[in-house]
Image: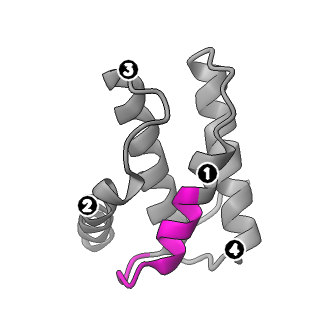
Amino acid sequence: PVIDLDRTPLATRQLRELAERICRIHAIAYSGDEDLTAVAESAVAVVSETKFRVARPRLLARVLVDHLERTRSSGQGRAGNIREGMRAAATKVAQEAVA
């Protein structure tokens, strides 16, 4: 099924499940075997706290994918702060929603 990430409010439990699935897909795609549960939890916490007027499921997906890709390409593993990319991701998502 296709989920409209702009119009679908999700509970924290559902956001956590979305984040964990994104992490699993990332691990499979890049042959990673590390446990990304802490990264998923951190992403959900950051997105749940946000005051941006952006759909949280879309923001979570963007922030988490950007973070996973940034840490993979820089060779940092799980290192790095997910909060660093929050404002940039929220701005991008807001601009895309208007366009």
Disc 1 or disc 2, which is closer to the eye? 1
Q: Position of residue 18 (x, y in %)?
A: 67, 55
Q: Which residues are magenta?
A: 42-54
Q: CA distance from mark 2 to mark 4?
A: 23 Å
Q: Earlier in the sequence, mark 3 or mark 1?
A: 1
Of the numbered discs 4 and 1, the one sitting upstream in the chain is 4
Prevailing secondary structure of the magenta residues = helix
In the displayed structure, does residue 81 sit left or right of residue 42? left
Secondary-structure class at tag 1: helix
Identify the residue position indicated by label 3 in the image: 75
- Closer to us: mark 3 or mark 4? 3
Q: Mark 2: which secondary structure?
A: helix
Q: Which residue is mark 2?
A: 92
- Give the mark, 1 or 2, whose residue is nearer the N terminus: 1
* Viewer-nearest of discs 2 and 3: 3
- Determine which residue is flagged by label 1: 40
Q: Residue at 69% across / 21% down in the picture? A: 33
The Cα–Cα distance between marks 4 and 1, rounded to whole angstroms, is 12 Å
Residue with the mark numbered 4: 12
| Quadrant of the rendered image containing residue 32 | top right
User: What's the residue type where badge 1 is placed?
Assistant: Ala
Between the residue at mark 3 and the residue at mark 1, the CA separation in whole angstroms equals: 19 Å
**At numbered mark 3, what does the secondary structure look like: helix, strand or loop?**
loop
Q: Are marks 2 and 3 in contact (CB under 8 Å)?
A: no
Element at label 4: helix
